[in-house]
């Protein structure tokens, strides 16, 4: 193989692989979720957390229980017994039991559907958000969030995480104090390391929900790249053959 052919293949692979790498470093200031949607055990744990702590308010309008069972390696009975708390049919969508009209009256607007939340915000944002709740008596819900200030929801995972309180700074000019960090004032059912692992699993599940086809797409991605590399080589050799006698 000639040097020019190797350079051509390297450029193609570099362009194809470079885009995801660049995206991975975006969103400065956020914690790295470092998820792996190929880890079915992580997705199963994340699904359990979601349906036990989040599905009471939030729906997944674009996700069916049957699809979750298929992709996560669960049986129909496991899904119906452990994830379906609304009595929905196995092929039905994962809709919250909370009526949207009532939710609008109670909270001002219905809680957002989470089907595409990671696709919209990114996994690092969602992971950071889940770890950034703190007690704030000045808020009607009693909670606030450093990633999404003045969020209108309490911390749904406080029993697992414990109670975080803000570390405040006092500006030298006497201005308004600002939150510079968070500290755990009361332990939860999990250690901090266990809680970070749990929110990582939850983020992984929501990432899968945002694009279920990614499980299959990523599994065939390497073959697509190999095909493109081989095609590039053949195209170069064909071009070389056509032009070898042209001066």
Image (cartoon, rainbow, N blue to C red):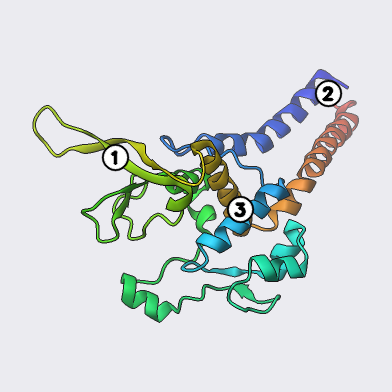
Whether the residues at callouts 2 and 1 have beta carbons within 8 Å, the answer is no
* Residue 69 higher or lower than 217, as above or below: below
Q: Name which residue lies at 38% across and 75% down.
A: 103
Closer to the observer: label 2 or label 1? 1
* Residue 53 higher or lower than 201, as above or below: below
Residue occupied by mark 3: 46
Q: Name which residue lies at 85% across and 36% down.
A: 230
Q: Position of residue 212 (x, y in %)?
A: 67, 58
Q: CA distance from mark 3 to mark 2?
A: 64 Å
Q: Quadrant of the C terminus?
A: top right
Crowding at dot 1, Cα within 10 Å, few <14 / some 14-19 / many 20+, comes out as many
Secondary structure of the residue carrying numbered label 1 = strand
Closer to the chain start, of discs 3 and 2, is: 3
Q: CA distance from mark 1 to mark 3?
A: 27 Å
Q: In this image, 182 relative to 169: left or right? A: right
Q: Position of residue 54 (x, y in %)?
A: 50, 62
Which residue in the rendered view is the most extreme toward the top?
Answer: 3
Crowding at dot 2, Cα within 10 Å, few <14 / some 14-19 / many 20+, comes out as few
Which numbered disc covers residue 166?
Answer: 1
Residue occupied by mark 2: 247
Let me know if residue 162 appears in the view. yes
Q: CA distance from mark 2 to mark 1?
A: 74 Å
Let me know if residue 115 appears in the view. no
Front-lying residue, 147 or 87: 87
Secondary structure of the residue carrying numbered label 3 = helix
Closer to the chain start, of discs 2 and 1, is: 1
Q: Position of residue 20 (x, y in %)?
A: 61, 39
Q: In this image, 76 relative to 62: left or right? A: right
Front-lying residue, 63 or 182: 182
- Total labels: the figure holds 3
Closer to the observer: label 3 or label 2? 3
Q: Position of residue 200 (x, y in %)?
A: 56, 44
């Amino acid at each position: 193989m000639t040097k020019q052919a190797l350079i051509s293949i390297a450029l193609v692979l570099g362009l194809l692989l470079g885009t995801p790498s660049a995206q991975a470093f975006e969103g400065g200031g956020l914690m790295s979720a470092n998820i792996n949607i190929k880890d079915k055990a992580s997705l199963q744990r994340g699904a359990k957390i979601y349906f036990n702590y989040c599905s009471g308010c939030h729906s997944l309008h674009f996700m069916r229980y049957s699809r979750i069972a298929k992709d996560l390696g669960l049986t129909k009975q496991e899904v119906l017994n452990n994830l379906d708390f609304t009595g929905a049919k196995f092929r039905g969508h994962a809709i919250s039991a909370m009526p949207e009209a009532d939710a609008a009256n109670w909270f001002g607007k219905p809680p957002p559907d989470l089907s595409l939340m990671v696709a919209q915000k990114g996994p690092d944002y969602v992971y950071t958000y889940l770890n950034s709740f703190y007690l704030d008596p000045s808020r009607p819900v009693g909670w606030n969030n450093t990633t999404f200030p003045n969020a209108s929801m309490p911390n749904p995972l406080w029993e697992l995480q414990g109670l975080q309180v803000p570390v405040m700074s006092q500006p030298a000019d006497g201005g308004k104090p600002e939150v510079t960090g968070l500290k755990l004032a009361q332990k939860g059912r999990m250690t901090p390391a266990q809680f970070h692992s749990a929110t990582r699993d939850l983020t992984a599940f929501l990432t899968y929900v945002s694009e279920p086809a990614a499980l299959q797409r990523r599994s065939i991605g390497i073959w697509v790249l190999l095909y493109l590399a081989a095609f590039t080589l053949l195209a170069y050799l064909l071009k070389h053959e056509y032009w070898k006698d042209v001066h």
